[in-house]
Amino acid sequence: MRLPFAGFDDIETEEIAAVHCSSSKMHRSRATFREFLVAGVATISAVIMGLALGWPSPMFRKLTEHSLSDNPIGQVIVESEQSWINSVLAIGGFFGPFAAGFLADRHGRKLTLMLSALVHVAGWVMLLQAASVALMIGARFVLGFGSGCILVTLPMYVGEIASDQYRGMLGSFLQIGQTIGILYVYCIGPYVGYYAFQWICCAVPILFMIFFGYMPETPHYFVSKGLYQQATVSLMYLRDASADEIQPELQAVKQFLQREEQQKNSNAVKKLFTEAVNLKALAISFSLISLQQWTGIDCILSNSELIFDKAQISLSADVSTIIMGTIQVACCCVTLMFVDRVGRKPVLMSSALGLTVALTLLGFYFLMQNMDVEQQYISWIPLTGMVGFIAAFNFGFGPVPWAIAAEIFAHDVKAIGNTINVSVSWILDFLALRFFLLISESFGYQWAFWIFAIICALAFLFTMFFVLETKGLSLQEIQKRLGRKPEQDESNGTQGSL
């Protein structure tokens, strides 16, 4: 059958349909590309966080070498100084979210991320000028403050620019970005001088500010300020659509923010701590994130080269750390593909079990090393244990606790609940970093690893008996599983959110 068409009366109906289908696919492809481009550029800020997290691993080796050939301080730093330089990042991280929340609401998510990157530039410049331990500690505090700002603002930005189809995947970019930043440090830090390395790290936030300057502000922020024309332009770019085509989404954003404004008038703090359902949600998310910090992940990431040096294996500490960092990035990417298919609880339990085995194995290695067991029989353990630990963590206890925290709260208490979780995670991270060096220097690495192994075993049991499986559940269904009565759903904002 032929269809009359001005100038194209010989075109088959099927051919016209194919043209329209091709045009539609091209439109969707451009829109998808723009979403991933904007989220990808924003995620460079997570790479910036990774640089600060991984920095101690190669730098502590330079700062503890007795030759002082690449030491800006001019003296070998002792264990207590290492502990403070390492852990003060978490103190800065504790204060960052409060500043970021204020700036993001008043001046926008985009500006807040750019200012966070500028704070990191200041931190790296301070490290370039660091001629004392005190100044180095101050620089690490500044880097932690900037990282705390990013940790709050980046998920907010990505969540607000992403479509429903890709929000989950793009939201997971934060974890991948962090691991890429850590790998960047592992690959470059050991092979360049101290000052060159600080410049190389400083270049990343500078490049981020340049590229991110071309990215749009979120439609949510513009709507919250009554700037509907700017919101329309932002959505038109992100969805590669006309003003008419984005109107339904724009209206949905307006309605969502109106509901949010109404809920702000209620006492969210009181509701969080007085309603049994909200307390249960807080207890589950708070416990998971606390257990996550006490798996020892940041202790191992920031001290990996020192641990490999202490292990005295045939493979160099530099190469071993790079292998570990590469496995970490790969595991983060693989986990994204199946965590929604398998479910949260099985993934968390498998991860906790793997962490327990890896940490126990590492503890026995250092015990046997102290007992002068021949190296040829146990030399395989350190790299195997460290890689196994990293793989197990990024398989589950890395990304999943934050995913559960994002979906388990009712909407009207979600902001305060997650602020508590983020702030407490930095405090616990500080305590874990201080604890690791104290125990390892006083009693040996084996006891530090075994204590973390016991905590991971407790994480397995906690997940088995107390964690709610949220796979495939809507926000309303999650609240009902927690014990909320159906008539409470609407008043507590569990109808879903953008």
Image (spheres, helix red, strand yellow):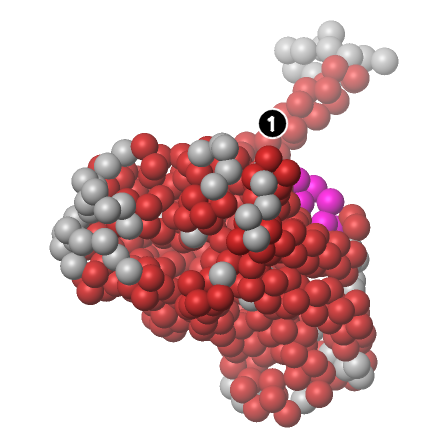
Could you say where residue 25 lies in the image, as x and y percent from the top left?
A: 65, 29
Please determine whether, in this image, residue 341 is positioned above or below residue 475: above
Residue in the picture at 78% in, 48% down: 341
Could you say where residue 485 lies in the image, as x and y percent from the top left?
A: 80, 83
Residue in the picture at 65% in, 52% down: 361
Q: Would residue 12 be counted in the magenta stretch?
A: no
Q: Nearer the viewer, residue 161 or 51?
A: 51
Tag 1 secondary structure? helix
Classified by dominant secondary structure, the portion drawn in magenta counts as: helix
Residue in the picture at 71% in, 87% down: 276
Please determine whether, in this image, residue 450 is positioned above or below residue 416: above
Q: Is residue 251 left or right of residue 132?
A: right
Q: Can you say which quadrant of the picture contains the C terminus?
A: bottom right
Residue in the picture at 23% in, 53% down: 76
Instruction: Name the amino acid, label 1.
Output: Met
Crowding at mark 1 (Cα within 10 Å: few <14, some 14-19, many 20+): few
Q: Would residue 334 be counted in the magenta stretch?
A: yes
Q: Nearer the viewer, residue 161 or 305?
A: 305
Per the rendered image, the range of residues in magenta is: 333-340
Q: Can you say which quadrant of the picture contains the N terminus?
A: top right
Q: Nearer the viewer, residue 23 or 495?
A: 495
Can see residue 393? Answer: no
Q: Is residue 448 left or right of residue 477?
A: left
Quarter holding residue 262: bottom right
Could you say where residue 211 lies in the image, as x and y percent from the top left?
A: 34, 39
Residue at the spot of label 1: 26
